[in-house]
Image (tube, rainbow, N blue to C red):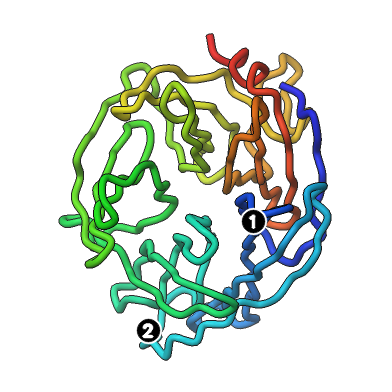
Amino acid sequence: MLPLLEKRLTIPGFNACIIPQQDGYLGLSRVCVQHSQRGVYPEATNTIVMFTLNSEYDVISTNDVKDTTNRTIHTSWTRGIEDPRLLSSNRFTAVTCDTNARWKPEMSIVTFTTDITSIMPLCIRGKENEPQKNWLYLNSHTEELHDYLYSSFPFVIIRLNMNTGEGYIIKEESTPGYNIVTHNGAVVKTSEGYLLTVRVKQGYSYHYSLWVKLDDNYNLIQVSKPFRFIIGTYLNNDGTFLPGGYEMCMSLHMEANELVVCVSINDADNFIQKYDIADINSMFP
């Protein structure tokens, strides 16, 4: 699986995502400043950078997206907004730790223009005290009710009320034969249903990624062979993958028959990659 195009983005931060807009792309990235004194909280402060790209993925502009909400900020592991995933030109999902007093990361919906205007924490009944990260938007039934992929392997689908921020589990699917721990990366709607990429962990380390196909009812169709976005890294002599390094795909979208990927490497560099969808499909058995 070789990319048709690979281009490093000259932007601040990591875990970038993009969406198409007229004559180019809108993107967000996360900047994290680690504090020098460990055990004094927050240990790190996060900010969001908004950027625009032209059609060739050259950077046109970057600017900080300031939090102007005057919200209550709770002391927690970190402060600020982490790991944005764009939903539209004025909304994104993100991880927030300082929006609650439970010392747990949670998912929030963030509204913004040039600055952040609202942050609404999201909650799944019965899972309030569990760490929450990496939910992926799937589908809207009404303006109010939206479906998200909560987790993969096994697959859990949730339905959220976007007015209240509360939701519940609507589907759980076991995955016999897959004894793996995964984190959701990014998802895109296709003619078959949904194409998803997930990161597989070995212990605390990143191991490799998988492509996954779901149908329109969120049933598992196929799982690809293991791969890495950066070719030739962390390989054993037999071509299997060693754990190590880090790859985080934060957005996918289709342009004709090409899949556009935004992937962050080692919490430092952001790349745009473009793949022929036929090459992606060849990764499935």
Q: Where is residue 223 in the image (x, y as percent from the top left)?
A: 47, 20
Of pointers 2 and 1, the one earlier in the residue sequence: 1
How dense is the environment of label 2, judged by Cα within 10 Å: few (below 14), some, or many (20 and up)? Answer: some
Residue found at the very far left of the displayed protein: 126
Q: Where is residue 172 in the image (x, y as percent from the top left)?
A: 23, 33
Give residue 229's quadrant in the image. Answer: top right
169 lies left or right of 8 = left
Q: Which label is found at residue 74?
A: 2
Query: For the N terminus, which image quadrant?
Result: top right
**What element does badge 1 sit on?**
strand
83 lies left or right of 132 = right
Residue at 32% x, 46% y is 140
Residue at 39% x, 74% y is 119
Mark yes or no: residue 126 visible. Answer: yes
Residue at 20% x, 45% y is 169
Q: Where is residue 197 in the image (x, y as percent from the top left)?
A: 53, 34
- 214 or 226, nearer to the observer: 214
Give residue 59's quadrant in the image. Answer: bottom right
Residue found at the very far top of the displayed protein: 285
Using the numbered discs, state the Cα–Cα distance from disc 2 to disc 1 in whole angstroms.
Answer: 26 Å
Q: Given the image, on which type of amino acid does mark 2 rest?
A: His
The residue where tag 1 is placed is: 16
